[in-house]
Amino acid sequence: MGYLLPESFRPGPPGPSRSQEIRAGQTSRQVAREDGEVPRRGTLCPFPHGGFWGRAFSVPAGRGETRPAASSATGGGDLERDDSGLQVRAQRRAAGGGVALGPGAGPGKWGRGLGAGGGPGDVGRGRADRSGLGDVGRVAPTGAGPGTWGGVAPTGAGLETGREGTARGVSRRGRGGVAWPARAGLTWDPLRGGGGVSPGPVGGRAEGRGARAGRCGTPWGAAVRQELAELEGAGERGAGGPRGPGERASAGPAASAAAPGERVGDGAPNRAGAGASAMFAGLQDLGVANGEDLKETLTNCTEPLKAIEQFQTENGVLLPSLQSALPFLDLHGTPRLEFHQSVFDELRDKLLERVSAIASEGKAEERYKKLEDLLEKSFSLVKMPSLQPVVMCVMKHLPKVPEKKLKLVMADKELYRACAVEVKRQIWQDNQALFGDEVSPLLKQYILEKEAALFSTELSVLHNFFSPSPKTRRQGEVVQKLTQMVGKKVKLYDMVLQFLRTLFLRTRNVHYCTLRAELLMSLHDLDVSDICTVDPCHKFTWCLDACIRERFVDSKRARELQGFLDGVKKGQEQVLGDLSMILCDPFAINTLALSTIRHLQELVGQEMLPRDSPDLLLLLRLLSLGQGAWDMIDSQVFKEPKMEVELITRFLPTLMSFVVDDHTFNVDQKLPAEEKAPVTYPNTLPESFTKFLQEQRMACEVGLYYVLHIAKQRNKSALLRLLPGLVETFGDLAFSDIFLHLLTGNLALLADEFALEDFCTSLFDGFLLTASSRKENVHRHVLRLLIHLHHRVTPARLEALQRALEPTGQSGEAVKELYTQLGQKLEQLDHLKPSPAPAAETPTLELPLPPVPSPAV
C-alpha cells in the first residue's frame, strides 16, 4: 500500500512516468494503475518546496517483510514500509526542506528534525495545518538546538507548536529515544520496533548511536501502535500526505495484532523475547522490578516521562550525591549504561568475595546454613548471565546442594556447563552414565598420548618412553583433570577404577594400568586421605612408585613389597586383582625386569644359582603377578599364578651362561696378542632357550630385556646371536610397541654397524621385515629407525629397504606419512652428496720421430 498524497502535490521530475495531476487521497498504487503500468517498486515524488527525496512510495510488502523501493537520482533518502504500516526507514534528509522521519528508522538513519517548510540548517516549526489534515500533529520540535534531542514528537490534535503539544527531547547522547508530547491526551505504551536514535554533533541531525536498527534504546509500548499508525497517516512519517480513513483503520489493528515475539514490520522473530522474559523472571520473585514491570507502568500511565523518572528513582542507585554526579558524566559523554554496569560489576565482585568469606569462617553448621539461605533466595536468578556467577559460587561452597536444585542444573545444559566441578561431583555421584561421558574423552586422550610417545621420531637411550619420572608423569593434563573431577569423593574414585578395569579387559591395553597407579599417586600427592586410606593398594603403590623412580628394586623395598603381598588376608583376595593391575603397569614391568637382569649379573659374579637368591625370586613373583593381571581379572580367580620351576632351574641358568660367554669373549679380546687363543663367539642358541621364549611369558619378558641390555652395551656379537630367536615369541612380545621402541633407541648406539651388510641382513631380513608386512606397528618402527639412521646404511641396502617398506593400499596414514618423511630424507641426502669430478682426458702422446738417414745407394 502506498502513501496518500496531499492536495498540494503535483507530479514533476523525477516523479511518475507520465505527466498528470495527482489528486488528493490518491495512493501510489492508484497512480501506477491509472498509468496502465505494473506498479513499480517506488514512485518518486517531489516535495512542494523543492526538496526531492527518494522512495516516497513502496508497493505493499508481505506481512513482516520490508521491501526497499528504487533509489532517487536526486534525493538521498531511503524510505521503506511494510503492509502493517509501521515500518518506515529513512536514511537521510532531502536536499531541500526536510522531514524528521519516524520510529521505524534505525540508528543513523533519521533526517533532520525539521518541519515541512524548514530549510537546511533551520530548526523546524512546522504547524499542524501543514499536513493538509487540519490540526493533526506534525513533526515539529520546538526550539530544539543542535544535537539536543534524538527523536520526534507529534503535537496533539488541536494543539499547536509551542503550547501543550510542544515536543520534548528525552534521549541523551548514546541513547535512543523519541520526544513525546507533554500532554497530548494519548495513552502510550512501549513500542516494539520503535526506531530510537541519539543526537549527533551536527545541529538538527539525529544520528543513531545506541540503538539497533528498527529497535529503540529506550523501552516503549505496544499500545501506541494504533495511535502511531494514525499519526503516520497524517503524512509526517512518509511525507506523502494523509491516508484515507479506510487505510488508516486497517493499519492500526494490523499493527496492534502483531505477535509478541515479532518486531513490528520486519518479520524477524524476536528469539530473545521469550528467553529474556524467562531470564529476568526471577527478579519478580525477589521484589525487584524488571522489564515487564516497566512495560506495565508505561502502558497504564498518562505521563510517560514522569513514570520513567519515577522508575529510575525507585530502581537506581540510592545515593543522594549521585544525582548531581550523573549529569557530570553526561557532559563527558559517558553513557548511563556504562556507569551502571561498572557499579554492578564492582558490587558483584564484592558479593563473590563475601560468599567465599562466609564459606571459610565460623562453625560449619552456621556457615552452611547461611549459604543455604542465600542459595534459596538467589537461585531464581541462576539463568541471568550477570548474576549466575554468584549463584554458582554459593553452590560451589555447599557440601550438599539440595537435590531439587541439582536436578534443575542437570536438566539445563547451559547451567550444567557453567557450574563448578564441586557441584558436578554431587551430580555425578548418582549419575554414572553422565560421569562416564565426562571421563571417556579423557581416557581416550591419555591412550593417544602414550601411543604418540611410543612412536616418537626421536631415537635416544636417554630420552625414551620410560624417561619421565613418576611425579612428572602425574602432572599430565589427563591425570590432573581426573584428580580434580574425583576430588575427595570415594564413589567417583571407584567409578573411575571400574572404567579402567572394564577398558583394560576389553582392550588389553596396559596403559590403563598406568593410569590406575598414576591417579592413586596423584591423590596421594594432594594428601586426599579420604581416598588413600580406603584404597588397600595405596601403600603398595607408594612403595612401588619409589622403586620406579629409582629404576631398581633394592632389598629393603623388596621386603616391604613382599610384606604387602603376604599380608593379604583370607576373604580379601580381590585385592590381588588391583595389585596385579598396578604391577602390570609398563613402568612397573620395566623396573622389575631391569632389576631381574641386574640381579642375574650379580649372581654370576657371586657364583650363585637363581634359586638361592630370595630377592630374585621376589622379583619374579611380582613380575608374574603383573603379567597375569588380565587373566586374573577376566577369570575373577584371585590367586597368585604358580611359578614355573623350569623358569628358575633351566631358563635363568641358560641366560646366565650367555652372560658368562660375553665376559669370556670380552676378556679374551683384551689379552695380549701372543696370549690370545683362537676363540670365536658362539653364534647359535640352545633349542631349549628358543622354546622358553615361545611358550612361557615370564621367560620371554626376561629374555627380551636381556636383548635390550646387550644392545645398550653395544654388544654386536651377542645381539646377532639372539636376534633369530626373537622371530617367534610368546604372544609376539618381540613385536610389541614397548619392546620395539626401546630396541630402536638402543640400536642408535650401534649406528656404525649399519654400514655392514651382515648386520643389516640379520637385523632387517632376519628379524624386523619378517613381521612388517603383517603388523603395521612393526612397519612404523622400522621406518622410524631408518629416518634416524638412513645416512649410515649403504645405498644398495637402503634402496632395497625402501622398496620393501613401501606402503600398500591397506596401510594406515601414519605409515604413509613416515614413508613420505623417509623419502624426503633420502632426497636431501642425494643433494648433499658431492657430484663425482669429471674424469680428466688422457692427453694424446705426440712424440717427434727422430730423422732416419736414407741408405746410401
Image (cartoon, helix red, strand yellow):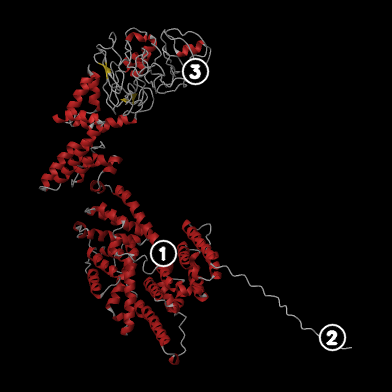
What is the CA distance from the residue labelled 1 to the residue labelled 3? 74 Å
**Nearest to the observer: residue 794 or residue 562:** 794
Mark 1 or mark 2: which is in front? 2
Q: Amino acid at mark 3?
A: Arg
Mark 2 or mark 3: which is in front? 2
Question: Which residue lies under the disc numbered 3?
Answer: 40
Local secondary structure at mark 1: loop
Quarter of the image with the C terminus in it: bottom right
Residue 854 image label = 2
Image point (17%, 26%), residue name: 314
The answer to whether residue 641 is visible is: no
Mark 1 or mark 3: whose residue is earlier in sequence:
3
- Local packing at callout 3 (Cα closer than 10 Å; few below 14, some 14-19, many 20+) is some
Q: Amino acid at mark 2?
A: Ser
In the image, residue 219 above or below residue 517: above
The answer to whether residue 128 is visible is: yes
Question: Which residue lies under the disc numbered 1?
Answer: 458
Give the x, y percent position of residue 168: 26, 18
What is the CA distance from the residue labelled 1 to the residue labelled 2? 85 Å
Give the x, y percent position of residue 576: 27, 65
**Nearest to the observer: residue 849 or residue 493:** 849
Local secondary structure at mark 3: loop
